[in-house]
Amino acid sequence: MTDENRIKYYDLLISMINNLTSFDNFKREELKRTTTEFCKLFRLSRGTTEFYRTPTHEKNNQGEIYTDYDTGEESDVVIEHRYVTPSMAVLKGSLYMAKGEKPLDDEEREKADAVLRIIMSFLTRNRLLGVVERFAFYDDNGYPNVRSFMRYLERLKESNNIGGHTAVRFNLRHFTLINQQIGRNAGDMVIRNYYSMIEKVIGDKGLLCRVGGDNFVAVFESSIVDEVVELLRGVPVVYDPASEKRIMVSSSAGVFSMPEGYVFTIAGDVMDNVLAAMQIARTGGKDSIVFYSAQMDKNKEKKMRLQQLFPIAVINKEFKVFYQPKINVNTGELVGAEALCRWFHDDRIVPPMEFIPLLEQSMDICTLDFYMLDHVCQDISRWIKEGRKIVRISVNLSRKHMMDVDLLEHILNIVDKYSVPHKYIEIELTETTTDVEFRDLKRVVSGLQQAGIYTSVDDFGMGYSSLNLIREIPWNVLKVDRSFLPVDEDDDKSTRSVMFKYVVSMAKELGLECIAEGVETQKQVKVLQDNSCFFAQGYYFDKPLPLHDFEARLDIPDYKDKL
């Protein structure tokens, strides 16, 4: 190798290294130029690098191949390297020389090999950074993930541009049912097309990411919030392009519009706000789109205080069982009661609506339910020992218990700990909102039935598939929701009167006890009697009673004066 070529080699090498090690000013064209000059210097006809994510991708020729210099001549490989990274990515580098060309001497081979390894090292880093980017910021289906969302927020914060943006977290409504209706593959197409519709509206004004399953989060300029919300409220989505079949898709969403000057401490603050609003949208009432408000901050603080107070309140037995009597409307006899929770804290009764919904947001509600069942069993055990009249007591269990595969065992352990005959316990469960919960509910009710414990479906008529609920699950008792109970202004032909009549008739035909809740007037008692609904619960007969007052009712279990 001549001195002139050595000088040229080192000049090219310095130029290449400066370009490759530039943190923010790397030039692809400069690398291509120096590679070409190196190939000419060493009389090479071609230089290639190849990158594959795995050896399988390499075998199937599914990778990235770069050829920065190629004379097109018939050539042979003179230097080749193949490297498999710890993450199983494969990098290959090859140098070719045309047939008949003067071979490389030892010095030339050493220097050409060094250049190839430098380029491969750079490409390895760059390609692996790309792989890391895909793994870290995109899910397996190619959707940007929640890390992409957090990074985008941080960039907006860094540029002092977060104000005037809106964040949204949304969940596709009833998507399990959509999958059942059209199949999972078509369901995936629905998600992709719905995503694309929203992404098109957002464009370069924000980012749309998938959190997982049918849950998404987005951030975008507030100027387009109405357009995005319109799609979230509902839009027909094509799932079969050939036949142009469509299905209506809507979302439950929490929306947080960030005012000018808004600053967050961490990106998770924004996520917390939209998540709080979305939870209300999913469970809180009529509107499926809920905008975040300052009141939610107060609720969040209240929830945090409750989470701190709750364990101590359980230890101190601040929660008391109140019993609301259930009455036979034909005889006036006390036939049962529902156990209801009252919280005595700081010399006042905390209304159930102030703590039950908050406990429902975590597994704390399960702790409270078991606490209530335990204290009910203690009371029944004592009544048996005292020789009192015993009636069946119903205890409510939250839907949260459906996740507990050992729920039946946990219930029986509590009941049997106090040697309470199973016939004196009734477990009330509310209707479910999804088919997954339905399967769990069926499993739990069937297990309780086999153990001889009564079960009742609470708030019948409010769930997503009420008729299927009583067709598939072996209940003992059906509690008719108060919304079905006729009020005094209703005549025999009113919607409520007709529905109540046939719900009661159906329950009787199925062999279920039927009890109406929310009975408040003499006229409503007459409606129950006329329709052969024999059992009632409500303020007309009695409010929920503290233990001592309920025990007095057990001693004189007669409500004939109310009939």
Image (cartoon, rainbow, N blue to C red):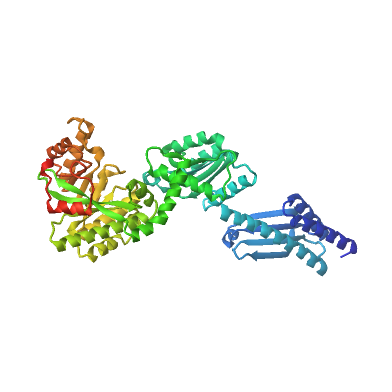
* Numbered circles on residues, count: 0
Quick one: quadrant of the N terminus?
Answer: bottom right
**Left or right of 414 on screen, residue 332:** left
Q: Is residue 404 visible?
A: no
Instruction: Tell me what residue is drawn at x 57 percent, y 55 percent.
Output: 136
Observer-nearest residue: 441 or 167? 167
Where 54 falls versus 533 (above or below)? below
Q: Position of residue 442 (x, y in %)?
A: 27, 53
Q: Residue furthest right?
A: 3
Q: Position of residue 353 (x, y in %)?
A: 34, 46
Quick one: quadrant of the C terminus?
Answer: top left
**Left or right of 508 on screen, residue 116:** right
Residue 22 found in image quarter: bottom right
Instruction: Tell me what residue is drawn at x 22 percent, y 38 percent.
Output: 485
Q: Is residue 45 visible?
A: yes
**Left or right of 81 on screen, residue 303:** left
Q: Position of residue 15 (x, y in %)?
A: 81, 56
Observer-nearest residue: 141 or 80? 141
Q: Position of residue 326 (x, y in %)?
A: 18, 48
Q: Residue furthest bottom?
A: 106
